[in-house]
Image (tube, helix red, strand yellow):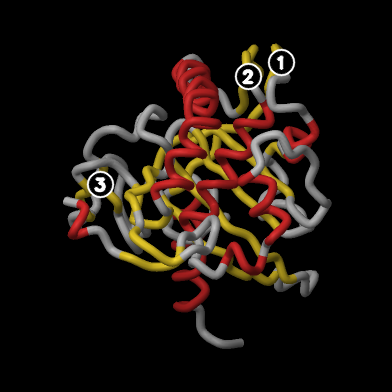
Amino acid sequence: MGKNRPSGPCHLCGRVGPLSFEHVPPRSAFNDRKVVLHQGEQVIGLGPGERPRRPGQIIQQGRGAFTLCAKCNNKTGRWYGSRFAAWCHQGMESLIAAGGKPSLVQLHYMFPLAILKQIATMFFSINSNGFCDAHPELQQFVLDKEKTGLSSRYRFFVYYFGGGSLRSAGVMGRMNVETGELLAFSELVFPPFGYVLTFGQNAPDSRLAEISHFADFKFEDFRVGHVSLPVLETHLVLPGDYRTLAEIQRDYEKNRSTERSPET
């Protein structure tokens, strides 16, 4: 098995060598079974209850890729994995309790710093191996479990996954055609949460809840508190799009109507 492992730069520390399979998110956070990924899936035009017409990619060992060296994989898993998994298990319980409500306020028991460091680790994995060179501050934040604080360059947001497709996207740009603002962000969706990392900018959707302040806790700080997060859907592969199926269909029909209208 080891002989077949790919080699290359570790996405976290940058050292070149054999790479290990990094589960994104960790196996203990509901990522220990077969998953189906729908890449570029188009749901526009699907009726209520219809299934995607194209089969997705089946990954037997859980979602992830060969992105981290064994040292970084083991170290981050040991430091952050179990605390992040506890956050996810509580989130799943809260999501089930939602009952279709658009938002939730639930009591959480958590280690905020470890949770944020695991989220940051996942963003290293879903981005290219050059991400660590471009973001040394974030790299050192993850590699030193006791390190606290991040500059305002990095902002983290979270929401409950309310249905749709899994998706992940490395850093991409999106322009607001009305304001001309260019937003750079990365996104990862895996039940029960979706995560967004921006670079000193606002979230791609104002409903997302910011958790950047988790970086200001100490590693052993344990907190009990109420967490309010929106429940959003991710039906399209396009990062930052949280429209429901009804909203997608409505916009599709509106665009079709515009295209059919005669010029005046």
**150 sits to left or right of 207:** right
Regarding mark 2 in the picture, which secondary structure is present there? strand
Q: Position of residue 147 (x, y in %)?
A: 74, 39
> From where the camera sits, is residue 96 visible?
yes
User: Label 2 belongs to which residue?
Assistant: 110
Regarding mark 3 in the picture, which secondary structure is present there? strand
Q: Which mark is residue 36?
A: 3
**241 sits to left or right of 46:** right
Quarter holding residue 232? top right
Ranked by sequence position, the earlier of labels 1 and 2 is 2
> From where the camera sits, is residue 245 visible?
no
Q: In the depicted view, which residue is nearer to us: 42 or 167?
A: 167
Q: Residues within 10 Å of mark 3 (few under 14, many from 20)?
A: some
**262 sits to left or right of 167:** right
Quarter holding residue 157? top right
Relative height, residue 16 to residue 162 (above, below): below
Relative height, residue 255 to residue 86 (above, below): below
Count up the numbered dots: 3
The single residue placed furthest to the bottom in the displayed view is 263
Q: Which mark is residue 211?
A: none
User: Label 1 belongs to which residue?
Assistant: 223
